[in-house]
Image (tube, grey):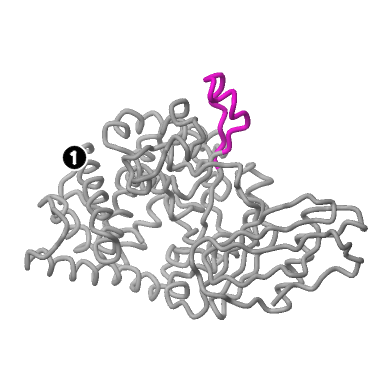
Amino acid sequence: MALAAPATQVSAGAKRASGRHVGGWRPLRVDAASACAIRGQLSFFHPVPPAERSVLNGLLLTWYCVCYELNCFFLSYTATTFVVKRTRPGSQTSSSLGLVREALFYQQLAPQLCSSVQLHLPNCIYAQADEANAKHLIVMEDLADAIQSGYFFGKYSPHNWNKDIEEQTRGTCNKITARDIANAAFVEEAKLHAAFWMQEELKEREWLKGAQWIDGQGRESWDKSQKQSLDCWAQAKEQIEKGTSEIQWHELVVECIEASLAQINWQDYVDELNARPWTLVHGDCHPANMMVRIPDLDACKEDETKNVSVILLDFEMVGVGSGPQDLGQYMISHTGPVERIAMEKEVIEDYYKTLCSLNPSVAKAMTLEQCWEEYVYGGLAKWLWMMPILVIHCPANFTQFFHDQILDFVHTHELTPAKMPMPRV
């Protein structure tokens, strides 16, 4: 449905707002209550004189999730673009993964994070969460002036295959390195982790992934997540044994996955959670889920500055868990072995220093050595859970890349199947 126009008179010269989708999703209607709330929030976000209220009639929220652009034109002939994310109607995946939690994050936690630790997030204009029906709707600022941070990791990552990196980074890829991006990203991660370090209030927010598990509750969701990986691995093993797998499996990776999956045990998982510090975590931490803002693009091209800031996105998997685990997931995701080995010690040390400076209680609960261990084992445990799922649901060339990333990470840290952690979901 179209949003109703404000009561003020609309001039003949006013332009209509339009929605342009990202991806080919099917049409979807928005209820009247949501439309009115969004209209009010848009007007508040873009304050203009009463005579120049935003023209929102003709604005169609009609595209079937993940996100699309919303172009709002004003009587003053200025324009503002927003990004809209909405749950795909009837999506069992959305329901089973609990993706509504992203809207709850923007409603309940984002304001505090932005004010207390100045975490860089998109400006959320409106967030609606319907937990009962597993639906959500989010309207946020368009980050068109920013650059997806994964592009700075070059063509090594499959996310960037067949991409013009020079164009995507607006001519800055030779000035800003993956290490610069990782450092900036880990500053934001430190802010996220410091703000709610071992805060009991997180347990009360049952919509956060893993919030109930700390107290031994919510086993059903944990079982379902682990079963997903186990079932996918059973299919992958069948392909391997029949010789039909498109993945070139290294024996060590197979042994590591099997050793990890064999350890799956609910009570052990709960005990491990309580044996290490926990906090608010992103849950899907990788460079493609972050954007980079470069305040002075021309100066950057002239190599006069590397002043960049990273904005965290996509909080669909936000939850309670190990902070350094987020960083391990990040590094395995995009970073080549040589580049990773050259930077990982330093960026983890810098992360730890930032974390402790933001929240001094961290140093009492976790040493630098323990932080490093969690980076290694926590990050690997996350990927050992994901790898079987990728085998079944992702293209073979993508899956091969992540197989090789896991293998290189295991070799770097001299790990063996006997040292494998239980998968972390």
Residue at 61% from the left image edge and 59% from the top image edge: 69
Q: Which is more toward the observer, 193 or 266?
A: 193
Q: Which is more toward the observer, 377 or 181?
A: 181
> Which three-letter amino acid code belongs to the residue tagged 1?
His
Q: Which residue matches tag 1?
A: 411
Quadrant location of the N terminus in the rendered image: bottom right
Residue 224 in percent (x, y) is at 34, 73
Task: Say left or right for 406 vs 88.
Answer: left
Residue at 39% from the left image edge and 37% from the top image edge: 153
- The answer to whether residue 352 is visible is no
- The answer to whether residue 205 is visible is yes
Range shown magenta: 293-310
Tell whether position 308 is magenta: yes
Q: Which is more toward the observer, 343 or 53?
A: 53
Residue 63 in percent (x, y) is at 57, 70
- Considering the numbered disc 1 on the image, is that residue within a helix, a strand or a loop? helix
Quadrant location of the C terminus in the rendered image: bottom left
